[in-house]
Image (spheres, rainbow, N blue to C red):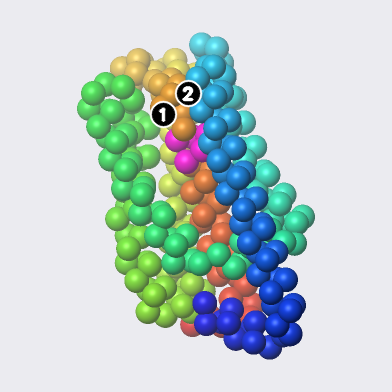
Amino acid sequence: MNMKNETMGSIPENVASELDNGHSNVGSVVIAALALWLGLVTFLGYQGAFVASPGSPPLPIFFGLAIPLAVFFAAYFGWSEFRAFILGVDLRVVTAMQAWRWAGLGFLTLYVKGVLPGLFAFPAGLGDMAIGITAPWIVLGLVRHPSFAASRRYIVWNILGIVDFVVAVSAAVLSSGLFPGINRLIGNVTTAPMSQLPLVLTPAFIVPFFIMLHFTALFQARQMARSGKGA
């Protein structure tokens, strides 16, 4: 926040006001897009649009995960106002939101109840919980030293958060019923429930959203490192 104020102080007041208005406008668009996205996923989930045919690859879930990310990266690299918005978001808030991933405990609960296979529930649940539980300490580092955002520890933590999702998605595919041998080993319990409400909100909304948060942090870390403001 201090860096922003210093920057604004070096340009004419009317220009600074226009920049703030532009930032606010993009923020409104982002909020509206998130609401529309959530509503669309809920509607499609209610219609069963994410349910794949038995024995076929879980392509509906894949597209539900990949399309929002493709839109995010296209907007970041192709829309300067959006890129400025992403690079100006408060990293303390972005990082604190990752604390919600302690809810990965729910995957372990569903495993115990026989709803989800352990091959998916354990790596997805434990990985999410690890990121969620450590998030407050990472936020504390940002509060104490804003330059912590460009530190190796912060960058690695965000990369590990993304790797956790890659591992979870891979495990979900392996235990989706697409591979009969693996399916027999895990007791014929598959990740099919993840394609139905309310669980479908995880791969089609929550996971890509949190991946966007991680990349927002990494984009800002790279910017700080290039500007020499890092630790």
Percent x, y for residue 43? 54, 24
Q: Are marks 1 and 2 in contact (CB under 8 Å)?
A: yes
State the residue in front, 187 or 42. 42
Residue ID for mark 2: 195
Q: Report crowding for label 2: few under 14, some 14 to 19, many 20 or more residues within 10 A (C-alpha).
A: many
**Residue sitting at x 32%, y 43%:** 103
Percent x, y for residue 193? 40, 21
Q: Is 166 contained in the magenta span?
A: no
Regarding residue 166, the answer to whether it shows in the image is: no
Q: Which residues are magenta?
A: 202-206
User: Would you say the magenta stretch is mainly helix, strand or loop?
Assistant: helix
Percent x, y for residue 38? 53, 36
- Location of residue 50 by image quarter: top right
Q: Is residue 102 left or right of residue 24?
A: left
- Mark 1 → mark 2, Cα distance in angstroms: 7 Å
Q: Report crowding for label 1: few under 14, some 14 to 19, many 20 or more residues within 10 A (C-alpha).
A: some
Give the numbered dot on residue 199.
1
